[in-house]
Amino acid sequence: MVRAAQLLAVLTALLAAAAAGGDAPPGKIAVVGAGIGGSAVAHFLQQHFGPRVQIDVYEKGTVGGRLATISVNKQHYESGAASFHSLSLHMQDFVKLLGLRHRREVVGRSAIFGGEHFVLEETDWYLLNLFRLWWHYGISFLRLQMWVEEVMEKFMRIYKYQAHGYAFSGVEELLYSLGESTFVNMTQHSVAESLLQVGVTQRFIDDVVSAVLRASYGQSAAMPAFAGAMSLAGAQGSLWSVEGGNKLVCSGLLKLTKANVIHATVTSVTLHSTEGKALYQVAYENEVGNSSDFYDIVVIATPLHLDNSSSNLTFAGFHPPIDDLQGSFQPTVVSLVHGYLNSSYFGFPDPKLFPFANILTTDFPSFFCTLDNICPVNISASFRRKQPQEAAVWRVQSPKPLFRTQLKTLFRSYYSVQTAEWQAHPLYGSRPTLPRFALHDQLFYLNALEWAASSVEVMAVAAKNVALLAYNRWYQDLDKIDQKDLMHKVKTEL
């Protein structure tokens, strides 16, 4: 009886798909994952296909994905992506659209710790900071800035392309449209190689560049140059975050889209077809049991890789078979410690004299990457940062969970430790090729772009690309897909 009901459901869905040919919009779209990629692509898909399309968003965890918070003493603190760059244009648009506000910035000084002493210390005076950089490293910091600005100037073309409706079926095609072979080559050569070629010194790379990359990716200057340049751009611009928590962007977009959020684990995507039109069966399991539904378009907005439980997701009925589970991800542990910093470890026996709120590290010490005196996601007008001798909430980012002895090294004493473990970013170099967004006719892999660079804004860019790709493919507007010389085309369209 159950088998007969399933066959009837398949037949009904196939007939509906056949009837929806021509210029009819898709009836149902599935999005797997409700992080920033999934929530943004749901928003963009509705924007392009219209409000009548039904969008089901599957999420096995909590909405927000790697945008998340942890509660300490009845206050909430960011445990995932903490801030965004001023050039994050999609994120800026989302905040305006949702009526959210930028969180008030509480200024704090930064320093880079080399295991025994600070190799670089920020002051409250901009000109003195520049002088110190020049004194220690010559003009390396200027050469780095010029290199990063050149990369970002070309990357920013993507917003113009997307505004004109252009999309790309693979990561390599997208990168080539922005920076031609230079960008593609930057995914195959290291940050260190590229910077040495433009005259940045090895010492500057070891002291400063490595510290920034460890803070953002937990990886070294041996990682690919393109991802490194995007990370270094984030360290140079002004940063902002969302009042109330960055994850509010995800829940806000899903609410705005009126997406149907299904709390379940997707186990498989199976291809059915009728008269050349693809139809996808999405199977899932939750507390109630196993079930499935049929969709015209499916977007995978969660990482597919070997060491992730999402790789339990299987693809059936595809010829050739879909096998994109290559590469590994970099594990990152975020520990929120409420306690008293051991300033003596950093060379300040008197805690009252410790001046830094943010500490980055070089490759030594290896047991932690960053240490930040963080503020809650809701900052009142009267809020002030804790004095160094007071108990504060510190965010420690490390490659592995911290041992008790390591916590005792960093803190004189502490009241609580709460941790979040993330498969935060791709382990660059663990995958031989750049993946594709289009896995099949109307089956897309949004997180493909992470293998070129990984950030919240990059996921939003990928979401817009996938929505445009689905739209252009659905209506067979092939002139808007994988076009060459787009800078010239866009200029002639203006």
Image (cartoon, rainbow, N blue to C red):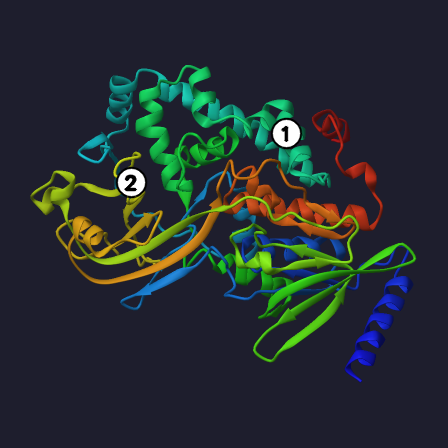
| Residue at the farthest bottom position | 1
Q: Which mark is residue 178?
A: 1
For the N terminus, give its image quadrant.
bottom right
Image-based side of 402 in relation to 426, left or right: left
Marks 2 & 1, CB-CB < 8 Å contact: no
Location of residue 284 in the rendering, given as x and y in whole percent from the top left corner: 65, 69
Which residue is identified by label 2? Answer: 366
Q: Residues within 10 Å of mark 2 (few under 14, many from 20)?
A: few
Image-based side of 17 in relation to 284, left or right: right
Q: Is residue 380 above or below residue 364?
A: below
Image-based side of 136 in relation to 277, left or right: left
Location of residue 101 in the rendering, given as x and y in whole percent from the top left corner: 45, 54
- Nearer to me, 449 or 351: 449
- Nearer to me, 286 or 479: 286
Mark 2 or mark 1: which comes first in sequence?
1
Q: Residues within 10 Å of mark 1 (few under 14, many from 20)?
A: many
- Nearer to me, 346 or 126: 346
Residue kind at label 1, given as amino acid type:
Leu
Residue kind at label 2, given as amino acid type:
Ser
Location of residue 435 in the rendering, given as x and y in whole percent from the top left corner: 64, 41
Location of residue 329 in the rendering, given as x and y in whole percent from the top left corner: 49, 47
Q: Which mark is residue 167?
A: none
